[in-house]
Amino acid sequence: MQKKWLLWAQKIQAEAHNGLHYTQDQYDKIRYRELMELAAEIIAEHTDIDKQAVFGIYAAEKGHRTPKVDVRGAVFRDEKILLVRERSDGCWTMPGGWADVLDAPSEAVEREIREESGFLAKAVKLAALHDRNRHGHPPHPFHTYKLFFICDLLGGEATTSNETDAVDFFAENDLPGLSLSRVVPEQIHRMFVHFRNMNLPTDFD
């Protein structure tokens, strides 16, 4: 179930950010800034993130507020899925991360796979487009869309990066401890379903 406090904080932050972006009135700027601080306080109250850290993240964003885009690549070998272990929390996830400006989504996920795992892959199917708030992830300051791609393995070899310290393939019934802020078990299981039936339509919220 979606946490109402998180939805409220994200909504307040987005409206305040957009207000700051468009208004020319100095008094409105003060009010919108106060609302951004309120949103940061709500997030801090319910998480282990410091209020000023949250506000700093919000204040650094420019332009009209839209959902952020996270891409994840499902790469299979011998009926096992490729996972990488994040240095930041010691847990495992499908390779991926934020899409960069000017990247096509498929290019973004292929780059993330290469950089985080050392393997070369090609995105061949958009399997799922999820609203992060609706799938049991821990709270996050920003509203995020998560794009999951089925990718063909082309080559390469397991190589760690500055973000990952282990790379391996895992069977569906033998998954390691997952980095739940990035991927939840149900999403990985769904990637196995799509891999076994590539004709399935894209899942979306």
Image (cartoon, rainbow, N blue to C red):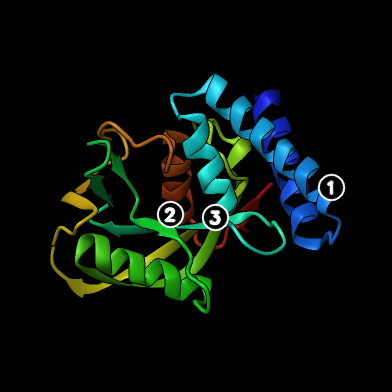
- Eye-nearest disc, 3 or 1: 1
Indicate which disc residue 27 carries. Answer: 1
Q: Relative to 99, is 184 above or below?
A: above
Image point (57%, 35%), residue name: 135
Label 1: which secondary element = helix
Spot occupied by residue 129 in the image (x, y as percentages of width and height): 60, 54
Numbered circle sitting on residue 60: 3
Element at label 3 = helix
Q: Amino acid at mark 1?
A: Tyr
Q: Which residue is mark 2?
A: 196
Instruction: Name the image quarter holding the N terminus.
Output: top right
Q: Residues within 10 Å of mark 1 (few under 14, many from 20)?
A: few
Q: Position of residue 25 (x, y in %)?
A: 86, 56
Q: In this rendering, is residue 157 above or below 89?
A: below
Residue 90 higher or lower than 159, as above or below: above
Amino acid, disc 3: Ala
Q: Residues within 10 Å of mark 2 (few under 14, many from 20)?
A: few
| Farthest-out residue, front | 26
Estimate the spatial distance between the alpha carbons at disc 3 and disc 1, rounded to whole Å.
Answer: 21 Å
**Earlier sequence position, callout 3 versus callout 2:** 3
Give the distance between the C-alpha atoms of the residues marked 3 and 2, in whole angstroms: 42 Å
Q: Along the polypeptide, which appears first: circle 3 or circle 1?
A: 1
Which callout, 2 or 1, points at the residue further toward the start of the chain?
A: 1
Nearest the camera: 62 or 188? Answer: 62
User: Can see residue 53?
Assistant: yes
Whole-percent x and y of residue 154? 26, 75
Could you say which is closer to the camera, residue 52 or residue 105? 52
Q: Position of residue 100 (x, y in %)?
A: 47, 69
Nearer the viewer's eye, disc 2 or disc 1? 1
Instruction: Determine the CA span between mark 2 and mark 1.
Output: 57 Å
